[in-house]
Amino acid sequence: MEIFPAIDLSYGQVVRLKQGDYHQKQIYSSDPVETALIFQKDGARNLHVVDLDGAKEGTAINADSIHALCSINELFVEIGGGVREEKQIKQYLEWGADRIILGTAAIANLHFIKEMIRIYGSSIAIGVDARDGYVAIQGWTKATNVNAISFCTTLQDAGVQTIIYTDISKDGVMQGTNLDVYRILRQRLPDVNIIASGGICSTNDLLALRDMGVHGAIIGKAIYENRISLTDAIAITATER
């Protein structure tokens, strides 16, 4: 299973939100590149980057930081947050990003998603953020009446290869992840790589996700708060079940 340490950006700083609440923001670093290099030194091969301000506003607020992070050698970098137009996808890929995460764009325009997959293939992932089982958009600030698991099935039918599924209620509260929903997704989406996000705070979470066949896990606050060693997380999930 692949481990993705997370760098959430807010006006150039590395932060974490609690349950997606922009008013509950904790700053961990003013140097995103330094943070990424520490992750790389600890064994990270991947990096999950989110422009939190971009997700809320629909434009690349943290473009300079993203450009710098994409320039780090030998890291697989995926970028999300406010990506809603093809020109932004192209820009990030030209900077060196390996995968672009679309969120609000997916719920708003499935035709756009299909077209981006046709053009960019596996370089496109979809972020499905769920609150109480329903998709939330615009940086988690707006609820919809779209069932999150059913929407994931629609995305599979559209040819999406990677889905990053976040249970917002679990994010940033350090109480464990929603293992039940990932078990359901693995059963219903055999052709999709599922990446778990939200609430992962122990090796037990990681081993359970690995053993059910989840492709990857995003870890944020648990690393920053020293609840999980990134080196250990990578080591235990690299072994066969």
Image (cartoon, helix red, strand yellow):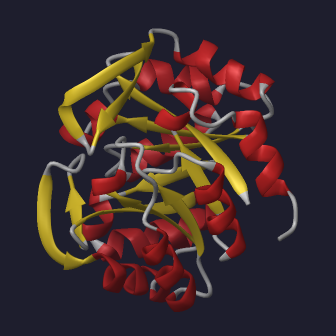
Q: Say if residue 159 shows up in the picture.
A: no
Quarter of the rendering occupied by the C terminus: bottom right
> In front here: 62 or 180?
180
Vertical position of residue 190 compared to residue 70: above or below: below
Q: Residue at x 68, y 49 (%)?
A: 3
Whole-percent x, y for residue 145 in the image:
12, 76
Whole-percent x, y for residue 41 in the image:
79, 23
Vertical position of residue 195 compared to residue 229: above or below: below
> In front here: 192 or 63?
192
Q: Residue furthest right?
A: 239
Q: Residue at x 22, y 50 (%)?
A: 140
- Is 218 placed left or right of 103 in the picture? right
Q: Residue at x 45, y 59 (%)?
A: 177
Tag count: 0
Would you identify the image quadrant in which residue 131 lies? bottom left
Would you identify the image quadrant in which residue 211 lies? bottom right
Q: Residue at x 22, y 57 (%)?
A: 137
Whole-percent x, y for residue 183 in the image:
53, 80
Whole-percent x, y for residue 15 in the image:
38, 24
- Is 209 placed left or right of 61 in the picture? right
Vertical position of residue 187 compared to residue 177: above or below: below
Q: Say if residue 123 shows up in the picture.
A: yes
Vertical position of residue 175 compared to residue 44: above or below: below
Quarter of the rendering occupied by the N terminus: bottom right
- Is 22 placed left or right of 18 in the picture? left
